[in-house]
Image (cartoon, helix red, strand yellow):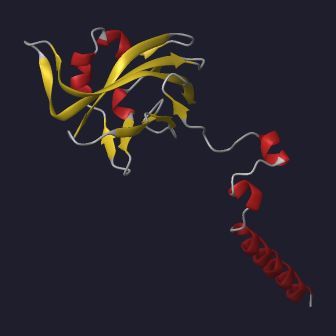
Amino acid sequence: MRKTATFALIVTGLVTLGCGAGSTDKDTASGADTGAAAAKGDDKPKTAKIGEPARDGKFEFTVKTSKCGVRKVGTSMLGAEAQGQFCLITVNVKNIGKEAQMFDGSSQKAYAANGTEYSADSEAALYANKNADTFLNDINPGNQVTGVVVFDIPKNVKLSKLELHDSPFSGGVTVALT
């Protein structure tokens, strides 16, 4: 008898958990602010705009400018030529952590409005950054550097957002470009 009662309680508990697993709070799902949600803070990361700081992990990013339509970076002797067009994203990166962290331009992503993802062009970034040695070295806590992340995208494409990461494995933060 005890085994049957215990089994029934376990099954009832699992069914109850299963029924509530997919439920959502209608007010929260619709975007309405509830007192509990406001007290906890917003779980969804905010999308920053150009000029606004946005944090991911140990870095605080501020996108300063976005310039697309660039055909070549570097000098006439040394440089890189775009397959399509270069988009030069000037970004300030501040280390808000407690230990040195390297900014890796290849961990950054750009997106077109249709969701197409573009990776950064590390070679072109070497030519676009006059002081590349400071931009690619470790950034100590409290310090910040400004540099250019370069994306080589088709001529007819316009970027809509960036996804900036403090490391290849971080969740990233979104910055709208439009």
* Quarter of image, res 46: top right
Q: Position of residue 114 (x, y in %)?
A: 36, 51
- The foreground one among 122 and 84 is 84
- The foreground one among 49 and 100 is 49
174 in relation to 55, above or below: below
**Residue at (40, 40) in percent of width and height:** 160
Residue furthest to the left in view is: 77
- The foreground one among 29 and 56 is 29
The reply, left or right, for residue 154 in relation to residue 2 is left
Q: Position of residue 18 (x, y in %)?
A: 72, 73
Q: Position of residue 128 (x, y in %)?
A: 25, 17
The reply, left or right, for residue 4 in relation to residue 151 is right
Q: Quadrant of the C terminus?
A: top left
* Quarter of image, res 96: top right
**Residue at (76, 78) in percent of width and height:** 15
**Residue at (69, 57) in percent of width and height:** 30
Q: Position of residue 159 (x, y in %)?
A: 35, 38
